[in-house]
Image: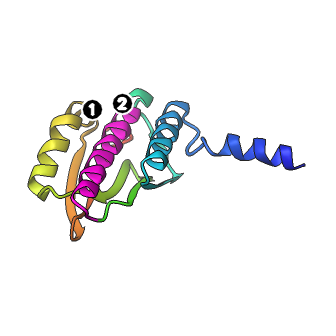
Amino acid sequence: MENLKEKYEAIQAGIYCNDWLVDGVLYHMAEFCRENGIAASFYFQKYDRGYISEEDISEIIYQLLAYGVRESLRCREEKRDSRSLFLQAEAVRNQLILNASFCSVKSIKKLKRDLKRSLSVKIVPYHGEIIVSEIKGEKKQISIQMQREKK
């Protein structure tokens, strides 16, 4: 019974949303965060990408998380709070919304410019928008909103 439970937990550890490519990205990033002492939390219970291609959403998620990890590690070098990385994906009506938060010493303007530069090619076809705000101190929140249904 114990052996069966371990196997089940190993399988479940890599399943976040039942999109195999997205699950692979999330699993890889969760492992990387664990190895670097960053607590990663991913919530994909209401995830439905609609017509957004699996390759595009996987690339967007990967780029966003990789950026968040780099910023968190940079915060750690400067002795600031960098222990957590959060990502939530949720389908709301005709939109897919990605909400992320992590530590960054960059200004909101610089953060938004960096993210637009790396993600615009993937989010523009879905009428995407990036919103960056400050939560508290160096903690930043990023929201990416994209149309998941064709207009």
> Three-letter amino acid code at disc 1?
Lys
- What's the magenta bit mostly, secondary-structure-wise? helix
- Is 133 drawn above or below residue 1 in the view shown? below
Q: Which residues are magenta?
A: 56-80
At 22% from the left and 47% from the top, the residue drawn is 129
Could you say whether the residue bearing mark 2 is in a helix, strand or loop?
A: helix
At 35% from the left and 55% from the top, the residue drawn is 99
Determine which quarter of the picture holds residue 125.
top left
Q: Which residue is mark 1?
A: 122
Q: Is residue 150 visible?
A: no
Q: CA separation, marks 1 and 2?
A: 6 Å
* Name of the residue lying farthest toward the right: 1
Left or right for 136, reference 58: left
Q: Which residue is mark 2?
A: 56
Q: For the residues labelled 1 and 2, say whether their Cβ atoms are less than 8 Å apart.
A: yes
Q: Nearer the viewer, residue 49 or 142?
A: 142
**Quick one: quadrant of the C terminus?**
top left
Residue 93 position in % (x across, y down):
41, 53
> Three-letter amino acid code at disc 2?
Asp
Residue 86 position in % (x across, y down):
40, 57
